[in-house]
Image: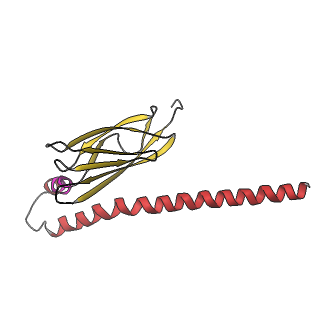
């Protein structure tokens, strides 16, 4: 009886750890390349077009003009409230889609390119994906990590 109980516990633990490890590996694999591909391709295109003695500041401005930038909350922030306001800039009048582990939110950037939306967080780590689609169907994505905790730090 004890032998069967020990075997059941060991097999259950192995199955649970295997499923959890697979989930985290797949979710990390799916979120990492999307955020790394886009900036690297834009940086390469800016480097090839920078044969005219322009400064790095002007290339940075050009680089962020057509993409979504999240200004609040900052990446890797700890918060103690279940609701945060996601603010940022995107191409003017673009469609904004914000995806959290709990829900998806839609909004539109203003004529000046600003957007702001309140989103719900689940306890623990929350990857927040902010996508913009402008009138010419150009797409841009920014992903930030916000951790919701009730612990006193």
Q: Nearer the viewer, residue 57 or 70?
A: 70
Does the magenta stretch mainly form a helix, a strand or a loop? helix
* Image side of residue 15 versus residue 93, left or right: right
Residue 98 higher or lower than 118, as above or below: below
Determine the residue positioned at 20% across, 53% down: 64
Q: Does the segment drawn in magenta span residue 88?
A: no
Write the start and end of the magenta stretch as one range.
Answer: 60-66
Picture coordinates of residue 22 (x, y %)?
57, 62
Residue occupying the far left of the picture: 52
Residue lying farthest to the right in this orientation: 1
Residue lying at 21% horizontally and 60% vertically, measured from the top left: 138
Residue 115 position (above or below residue 52): above
Residue at far top of view: 152
In the rendered image of this protein, does residue 89 appear above or below residue 135? above
Percent position of residue 6, x then y: 84, 56
**Residue 98 locus on image (x, y percent):** 34, 47
Q: As drawn, is 4 to the left or to the right of 13?
A: right
């Amino acid at each position: 009886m004890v032998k069967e109980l020990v075997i059941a516990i060991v097999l259950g633990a192995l199955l649970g750890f295997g499923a959890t490890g697979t989930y985290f590996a797949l979710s990390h694999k799916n979120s990492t390349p999307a955020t790394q591909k886009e900036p690297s391709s834009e940086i390469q295109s800016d480097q090839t077009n920078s044969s005219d003695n322009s400064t790095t500041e002007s290339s940075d401005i050009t680089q962020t003009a057509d993409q979504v930038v999240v200004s609040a909350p900052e990446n890797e922030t700890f918060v103690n409230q279940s609701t945060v306001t996601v603010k940022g800039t995107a191409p003017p009048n673009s469609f904004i889609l914000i995806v959290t582990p709990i829900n998806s939110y839609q909004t539109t950037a203003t004529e000046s390119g600003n957007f702001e939306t309140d989103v719900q967080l689940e306890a623990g780590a929350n990857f927040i994906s902010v996508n913009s689609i402008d009138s010419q169907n150009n797409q841009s994505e920014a992903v930030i990590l916000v951790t919701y905790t009730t612990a006193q730090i």
